[in-house]
Amino acid sequence: MPKIIGENIDRLCNIEYRPAGGSQRGDIMRYYNAAREVQKDPLSYLCAKALMDRVKEGDTILFVTGARFPHLLPYGETDGPLGVAALAKAVERGLGAKTVVTVEESNDVPTRGCLMGVGCNVRDLDEWKITDGACYLDWYPLGSEKGPEHAKYLVETFKPKAIVFCEKHGPNEVGYCHSVHGARIPPEEFANTWHLLDEAKKHGILTIGTGDGGNEIGNGIIYEYAREISPYGKKCQCGCGGGTATVCKTDIFFAAAISNWGLYGVSAMLAYMLGDVDVMHTVDDERRMLEACAMGGSVDGMSMRPICRVDGVSMAGGQAFVTLLREIVSDGLGKCTRKE
């Protein structure tokens, strides 16, 4: 039964009703089908089961997000922080885990707003250490020089059982990160968080990634597919010769129509497997998160404006998506409240 619920959650997470932009119509399912071919079982199920197997009460999960791009995305996108906040709530409420979220300093305000909007207990470091189920917001420094050092600090300090990446750029085969449109992101202008993969491998830490364009950390699992699917997968616009497809692999990768939705799907699967729909977030949480994110300066990835949309999908569309996820979970648990 969990895998059947996972199939339905996965399908919903890959409905392509965002406007066409960085990807062509039909590409969303191509990414998803590639991820399924490589990983076999429903992706939401794989992620949720791995978290339940690895994370016990009091353990820490580290989240990584923030699609920063100089000038265009100085405060990041609305895609990324909402997904992280939703899953942070789910693992806090459902697994009794503590959470750490790392972003660039410039992404602090919108990310903090999302976490507080969904009801996460955001605390400073000293309070985090003594508070059950608390969340700490860390600033990952910019640049390639400090990237490895901070990755080591995070793993050694917080000892996470899992590291979850959501909408975070990863480098291609020649070491450069790109936007989905093929533009190079200067390495000194954003957090080089992929070094966390090296630390995770050293310490046997579970890694999960979610993305929607082939250039986000985790897509390395489907690297050859992403090179073919993405318009600039093989050949970017900067001349480096490596294309936009990233080589960064996570243990599990959830390809979704919108990166946030991948982590929403994991939250929903956790809610089902734990027998409580309220482990996942609500439509009111969705509104609070999106409003806080936009007010903090994060932009909709389609319009490049700080408005209440995610990759062009309206707040109403996002709330409808959350409603349907909750229906899948509730009905699966035999708790349907609709009148016949």
Image (cartoon, rainbow, N blue to C red):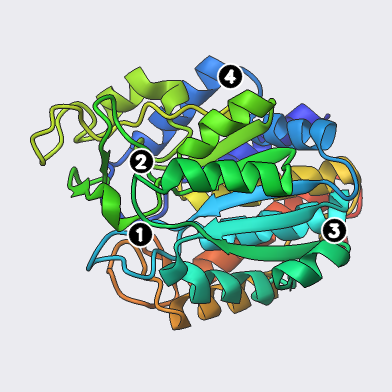
> Which numbered disc, 1 or 4, marks the residue that appears first in the sequence?
4
Place of residue 243 in the rendered image (x, y in percent of width and height, measured from the top left): 20, 31
> Which numbered disc, 3 or 4, marks the residue that appears first in the sequence?
4
Place of residue 118 in the rendered image (x, y in percent of width and height, measured from the top left): 69, 71
Q: Secondary structure at mark 3?
A: helix
> Which numbered disc, 1 or 3, marks the residue that appears first in the sequence?
1
Tell me the tag on residue 39. Answer: 4
Indicate the amino acid at tag 4: Gln
Mark pair 2, 4: CA separation: 18 Å
Indicate the amino acid at tag 3: Arg
Quadrant housing residue 73? bottom left
In the picture provided, is 247 more to the left or to the right than 293?
left
**Residue at 40 percent of width and 71 percent of height:** 298
Indicate the amino acid at tag 2: Gly
Mark pair 2, 3: CA separation: 30 Å
Examine the rendering and report whether any part of residue 187 can be seen: yes
Q: Secondary structure at mark 4?
A: helix
Which residue was labeled with disc 3?
A: 93
**Residue at 78 percent of width and 66 percent of height:** 128
Closer to the observer: label 2 or label 3?
3
Tell me the tag on residue 68. Answer: 1
